[in-house]
Amino acid sequence: MNTPVNPHVGMAPSPWIARFAHLVPAGARVLDLACGYGRHARFFAQRGAQVLAVDRDAAALATLAETPGIDILRADLEGELWPLGGQRFDAIVVSHYLHRPLFPDLRAALGPGGTLLYETFAQGNEAHGRPSNPDFLLRPGELLALAMAAPEALTVVAFEQGRVELGGRPAVVQRLAAVGPTRAWPTALDASPARREREGAPAVEVREGVHRAIGVKCAIFAGVNQC
């Protein structure tokens, strides 16, 4: 479950989200799903996006109410119908949240050239603490399957899965950056350390078992199934 106070992160944007933020142009309409206190909503609003921040926690959303560039929507994403109807977004951001029944709605809400930035915990994390419920842990390669789902596959820009240090403790995560099929190819990786530092994301180092394919980086860490 998404919680507004995550003990593993602060209010800085995720390094993964910040690294691939260049895939979301200024002026884009962005959905920050299960936003909590809105660290990513604030980040993209500061970059010139118009953000819809959605969460079930009214107190957390209230902290965003007067923030320029951010609209808020209180919704129980797991207890109600999809609250966004036929709305479509230029980008969808999901961090540390998983509710698999929403996957088709997320794909339907993403514009044809839109950006999907997703990261959350994965199987194997139960060995290190919460979340440990398999309902909230991605299966190996599951975000890739989401990107490849019908009706038309997204173009995967980057993918990682494996063990990392998060908030000073080990965790197992899965991360995806993908764009819609109408996005011009090739997509700029824009992965220079200097640029990532300017965007608030440290340089990403992958030390174990790296496999590279066209448009995809798949980081395989010890003990985690390969892509």
Image (cartoon, rainbow, N blue to C red):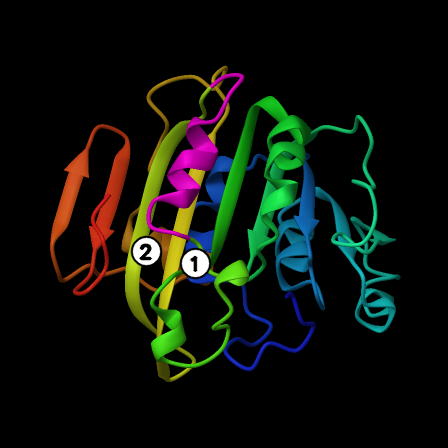
Q: Residue at x 37, y 84 (%)?
A: 168
Q: Nearer the viewer, residue 222 or 74?
A: 222
The segment highlighted magenta reads 139-152
Q: Residue at x 52, y 75 (%)?
A: 9
Q: Residue at x 47, y 54 (%)?
A: 119
Mark number displayed over residue 194: 2
Please, which residue is most extreme toward the front here?
Answer: 134
Q: Residue at x 36, y 83 (%)?
A: 169
Q: Secondary structure at mark 1?
A: helix
Residue 165 place in picture, x, y as percent: 33, 75
Q: Amino acid at mark 1?
A: Arg
Q: Nearer the viewer, residue 28 or 223?
A: 223
> Would residue 190 be visible to someone looking at this image?
no
Q: Is residue 26 left or right of residue 147?
A: right
Residue 220 place in picture, x, y as percent: 20, 54
> Would residue 217 be visible to someone looking at this image?
yes
- Quadrant that contains the C terminus: top left
Q: Which residue is mark 1?
A: 198
Q: Secondary structure at mark 2?
A: helix
How far, Cα to Cα, is label 2 from label 1? Answer: 6 Å
